[in-house]
Structure formats: C-alpha cells, structure tokens
Image (cartoon, helix red, strand yellow):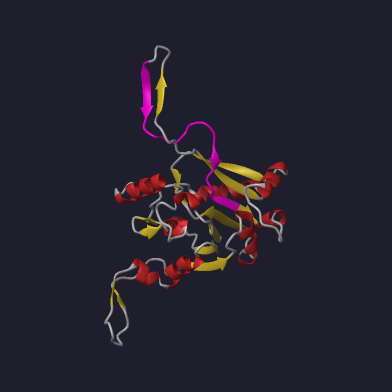
Amino acid sequence: MKVVILCGGYGTRIRDVSEDLPKPMIPVGGYPILWHIMKYYASFKFKEFVLCLGYKSTVIKDFFLNYKAHTRDFTMHLGGQTPIAYQEEHSESDWRVTLADTGLTSLTGTRVKRIQKYVADEENFLLTYGDGVGSVNLDELVRFHKSHGKILTLTGVRPPSRFGEIASDASGRVIEFNEKPQATAGFISGGFFVCRREIFEYLPANENFMLEQTPMQRLARDGQMMLHEHEGFWQCMDTARDYQLLNGLYNSGKAPWVLW
C-alpha cells in the first residue's frame, strides 16, 4: 500500500524557525520531520511513498537525490578520482519514493488529485501530512479501514493543550494536575488517513480546493467517512514551540514515534 504525503504548503506559521526550508524539511534531531514520518510508516512495512511537492520543492528533491550524503558520514579525496566512501550503509535501500510537483499554490485536495496516476493501481492508499508525527498503530488503522468498506478513514486525535489542566472537588481542593496534557474533550483530524481509490470521484480535476472542505464534507454527508480514534501521542509542527517540543522529545530519547 502506497503512502501519499502532502509536502507542498508554505508553512507560514513557522517561518521564525526557518525561512529557507519548506516545513517538511525542518529538522527534528538533525533529520527532516518528513524523514521521521517516512521512517514511521516504513516501520509498519509501508515503504512506497508519493510526495506531493510545491513550495521549495527543490530542497526536498535535493535531499533524496543526495540521500547518502545527507544522512551518512563519508570520506572523499578532494581533487582526486577516488569515489566517495560512505562509512556505513543506510537501512532505507528498499524505499521507493516518487517526487511529484503538484503546483506551487495548490491546496491539499488539488495536490491529491494530481498524484492520482501514481496510485491508480491501488485499491487503497495511505495519506498524511508532512508536518505531524504520532504513535498511531498503522496496522490497526488499515484493518479498521478495510473492515468498514467506506471511502475514507481519518484518524481523530486529541489536540495538545497549550496549558496545564487542573481538576478539583467541590471544596476547591485540587485532585489532579496535568502539565500540558492531551486535551480530553473532542477529537480533531490528525491526518493518518486511509483512502479507497473512489475518493478521486470526490476530487474535481480543474479546481483548486482544500481536501478538508467540500470533498470531506460530501463524504460525510454520503456516509462514506469513518473515524479511527487515537488516544495516544500526536503532535504537528506548526510553530517554534512545536519545533522545540519535538526536538526535545527526540534528543531525550523519549520520542513516541521512533520505532526504529
């Protein structure tokens, strides 16, 4: 099953971290968050990727065209004819990555429509954003999707709270305090979608549109969208604060998404 990743947005809310990189290439622990997402999917044996590129697409292309140089130590003889010697092999040699330019200003639905030809032979495909990680059990997600037969499954997550939560009894005595936990009320879409190929019937060919608006609203009205609830870790990287949080988790060895 192929994994489609939306990598083309401008990432305007995180420009204070980097103006030179597209958001999927902002590093977590020295590697782009896009790499972390792909490593996570590969941990569940999903190793065929279609990247929907847009803003600063050349940065992402360069990373994969020069993958060994970006991810491994190497030795080279300047001015000589000796090939570059890489100090170790990487474990991603069985990945298949398609880099597809889907338009500089395209919205999410348009980007998905423009890669239809790369997943045309798939009954189902995975879809996610290029800026969020989580501890979603992808095997369970796919099983749930196949069990109900609807067109789209989305993963519902608890939005991370920006502030601590306090619970008290009638007298005002604090009985529970959680420092910046996951919110306990309601779900939001965390990406980690699974789609049947019939989703393309909901995506017009000659418009620029958000997947999360008319297409998903129509799918819901038609009874073709199901929610997979995820109570565990999920975090997107929208702001400098998110960037610091994700790097702190990774650098401390406490990143819930690291299965490799």
Start and end of the magenta stretch? 173-194
User: How many marks overall?
Assistant: 0
Query: Is residue 124 located in the magenta-colored stretch of the structure?
Result: no
Looking at the picture, does residue 158 appear above or below residue 88? above
Q: Name the spot of residue 259 as percent of width and height, x first.
A: 39, 53
Where, quadrant-wise, is the C terminus in this rendering?
A: bottom left
Observer-nearest of 249 and 206: 206
| Image quadrant assignment for residue 81 | bottom left
Residue 200 in view (yes/no): yes
Looking at the picture, does residue 215 appear above or below residue 207? above
Query: Is residue 191 located in the magenta-colored stretch of the structure?
Result: yes
At 40% across and 25% down in the image, what residue appears? 166
The answer to whether 123 appears left or right of 63 in the picture is right
The answer to whether 212 appears left or right of 10 in the picture is right
Q: Name the spot of residue 248 as percent of width and height, x first.
A: 33, 47
Extreme residue in the top direction? 171
At 63% across and 55% down in the image, what residue appears? 109
Observer-nearest of 102 and 177: 102
